[in-house]
Amino acid sequence: MMKEIRAIVRPSRLLLLRDALRAIPNFPGVTLFKAEGFTAPAAVDKRTVKDELTDFTDKVMVCVLAEAEMVESIKNAIIDAAHTGQIGDGLVWVVDIESMQRIRDRQALN
């Protein structure tokens, strides 16, 4: 079964993330989307004027489509590369893919 692994990460972590993903045997590829977001106010103990003025911060959404047996290694690579230990490091989640078809040759992939 195919899965979609998505993550929101800091743009500054992309080079580390690229290297970590390329190191995974048979890594299928990645798509990136520019994104903006902010952390839930309840998650931030002490909000400052700077926090209020810079509410939306640049982020990158990472999207990987892969076989189910690759999910844990991909998730771990994303988490390891994106982790700084600070609020705003991001999220990673996995979604089932109901169907997928390559456009080039019309081949169904799951």
Image (tube, helix red, strand yellow):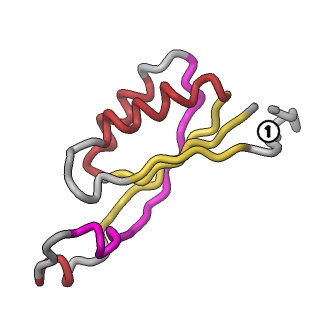
Q: Position of residue 14 (x, y in %)?
A: 33, 43
Q: Position of residue 49 (x, y in %)?
A: 11, 84
Which picture quadrant has residue 36?
bottom left
Element type where label 1 sits in the image: loop
Q: Residues within 10 Å of mark 1 (few under 14, many from 20)?
A: few
Q: Which residue is mark 1?
A: 102
Q: Position of residue 65 (x, y in %)?
A: 63, 38
| Amino acid bearing label 1 | Arg
On the rendered structure, is 41 left or right of 103? left
On the rendered structure, is 97 left or right of 22? right
Which residue is painted at 28% across and 44% down in the image?
13
Q: Quadrant of the N terminus?
A: top right
**Does the magenta segment cover residue 41?**
yes
**Does the magenta segment cover residue 98?**
no
Task: Specify start and end residues of the magenta stretch as a single range.
Answer: 26-44
On the rendered structure, is 98 left or right of 32? right
Q: Is residue 110 positioned above or below 48 on the image?
A: above
Which residue is painted at 44% across and 29% down in the image?
21
Q: Position of residue 45 (x, y in %)?
A: 17, 70
